[in-house]
Amino acid sequence: MRNYLSHAGAVDAAGHTSQQIRDANELIREGLRHADASYKVAFLCECEDPSCYDAVWLTCAEYEQRRAASQPLIVPGHRAPAAAEEQP
């Protein structure tokens, strides 16, 4: 997956930003617009670690709920980016 993201410009040799990963997750979700809502999908962790490429497994409905609540997708045990921690 990293090669695809590198080719798409979402990451570089130094890592990625959480905004780039959120954008990539939006592309993943958009590509699954007509998928079965019960399937779990591997979205990318949006934690503060620029070298993290761990998966957050959610259904598309769970993804939409998190986005509606402005919650970043974070693997348990990882830290949210500082900007996300400041959001209400």
Image (tube, rainbow, N blue to C red):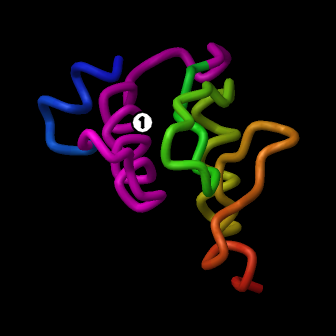
Task: Give the structural element (helix, strand or loop) at label 1.
Answer: helix
- Using the image as rendered, state which of residue 20 and residue 61 is in the foreground: 20
Please say whether residue 28 is one of the residues in the magenta stretch: yes
Q: Which residue is mark 1?
A: 29
Quadrant in which residue 3 is drawn: top left
Vertical side of 84 occupied by 17: above or below: above
Q: Amino acid at mark 1?
A: Arg
Task: Classify residue 57 as left or right of residue 8.
Answer: right
Task: Please count the marks in the image.
Answer: 1
Which residue sits at x=43%, y=41%? 25
Q: Foreground: 88 or 53?
A: 53
Residue 82: x %, y % from top left: 66, 75
Q: Tell me: 54 left or right of 19.
A: right
Q: Which residues are magenta?
A: 12-40
Residue 35 on image: x %, y %: 45, 18
Measuring from the top left, give residue 61's x and y in whole percent. Answer: 64, 38
Residue lying farthest to the right in this orientation: 77
Where in the figure is residue 77, as x and y percent of width and height? 87, 42
Q: What residue is shown at x 61% (from left), y 27% (from top)?
A: 54
Q: Is residue 62 above or below residue 50?
A: above
| Image quadrant where one finds the N terminus | top left
Question: Does residue 30 appear to the left or right of 85 in the view shown?
Answer: left
Locate residue 14 relative to residue 76 in the image: left or right. left
| Residue at x-position 49% and y-position 48% | 50
Height in image: 22 above or below 86?
above
Circle 1 residues within 10 Å: few <14, some 14–19, many ≥20? some
Residue name at image x 65 percent, y 27 percent: 59
User: Considering the image in quadrants, where does the C terminus appear?
Assistant: bottom right
